Amino acid sequence: MSAISHELPQAAVNAKLIALISSAAVFVGIFLSGFVISEPAPYELYMAGLIAIWGLFGLRLSRAAMPLLVLLVTMNIGGMMAMTQMADLANTPLYLSVSLFLAFTAVFFASVTAVQPGLYRLIFFAYVVSAVITSLLGIAGYFHAFPGAEMFTKYDRAAGAFQDPNVFGPFLVLPGIYLLYLLLTGPVTRMPLLAVPLLIITAGIFFSFSRGAWGMFAVSAVLLTGCLFLQSASGMFRLRVVVMTIAALSLLVVAMIVILQLPGVSEMFSNRAHLEQSYDTARLGRFARYAIGFQMALEHPFGIGPLVFGTIFGEDTHDIWLKMLMDYGWLGFVSFLTLVAWTIAAGFRIVLRDRPWQPYLLCAYVAFIGNIGLGTFIDIDHWRHVYLLLGLIWGAIALEYRHQRLLRPDPVQAQGGRRVVERGASVKDFERS
């Protein structure tokens, strides 16, 4: 008995230590996602090692999340088939390796959140910290706050620790939406604490001068507010959402008015605010290339190979659907389309259900819809945060699947003609974590 009493505390200590190490490892991975100045970025190197180590120690994928793995792998098989159509492979093997790696990161995040739902809170916190820091770098770069700060800009636009402001801006949408959610639903005393990072991230989105990021943030914020309004039957809560939304919008409008008074900002904003730019409507501009590309897809069912479209027309596809057809063929296109439709449909079924992880699912879901909408006008194929969003949503899908299974009545537990239903272990696990 004494031996057992000594062993149990040590086992508990070891389990706690493992949980802390695994949580810290995930935190670092998410934090690094905000710093992609060069490739391969620290995020790729770190996550490749983390996934490998986690896999050795029992990375498990829920049956409910298996479509995520199958469809992403099938999409990449389409890319490998498209590669056979190329006369010169150039950097194509590396490109497809990155595509497959990012697919595995989505599967990884779906797996760990389904097993440890408490990681959702940690992931979102790490994302916010990363977004605030990279936003500050972008803002400092835009205003040349210190020598060498211009490295955090591109085309006179804030890019943060990213290579492209058109990726930097959309990266900031999810943490911005999450902070907005906390602002709309949390206690009033926390408003100042949340308003500061929200304003920093919103400024980062603004100074990226990415029309797509502006639209994404606006659409995602509207969807978030609408979902919160529909989810609650309380008139007081709905009134609170309306009042807080008006307050948040007023704060943003005031901030915008102040920012637009700064030298050079108003002119850049005016130029970028147009729905159409010269490179969109030119003879072989973005919209013209769409028509040409879709015609080519009918003639090349296996695609023409990754990155080949840009070598032919001087500019890449700038459209995720055309990107799939050209770089991954019809097999990749159908796989990706199926994955997007499945993710949206399955997420829609559960996004308003009262679960401990529902706030994280809701924020990830509206941000994912925003990213897919933006994908119609820009290539989001290798955006790391898109694969993270996929993982977060499919992790919640797997959690709901397990939760529903555990809620099913068990005849063995019937007592006196009444069926006893245990509360889902998935909810218990979340609360313990």
Image (cartoon, helix red, strand yellow):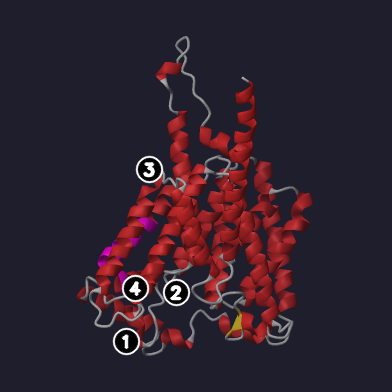
Q: Quadrant of residue 14?
A: top right
Q: Secondary structure at mark 3?
A: helix
- Where is residue 140? Give x, y as percent: 70, 78
Q: Residue at x 40, y 50 (%)?
A: 345
User: Mark 4 Cα within 10 Å, few/some/many (few <14, many 20+)?
Assistant: some
The amino acid beneath tag 1 is Ile
Q: Secondary structure at mark 1?
A: helix
- Where is residue 286? Give x, y as percent: 40, 82
The amino acid beneath tag 3 is Arg
Q: Mark 2, mark 3: which one is toward the viewer?
A: 3
Gap in Å between the C-alphas at discs 2 and 3? Answer: 32 Å
Question: Which circle marks residue 378 in the picture?
Answer: 2
Query: Label 4: which residue?
Result: 93
Q: Mark 4, mark 2: which one is toward the viewer?
A: 4
Tell which of 139 and 294 is nearer to you.
139
Query: Label 3: which residue?
Result: 63
Please provide the residue range marked out in magenta.
327-340
Report if residue 328 lies within the magenta region.
Answer: yes
Judged left or right of residue 331, residue 194 is: right
Judged left or right of residue 306, residue 104 is: right
Judged left or right of residue 271, residue 66 is: left
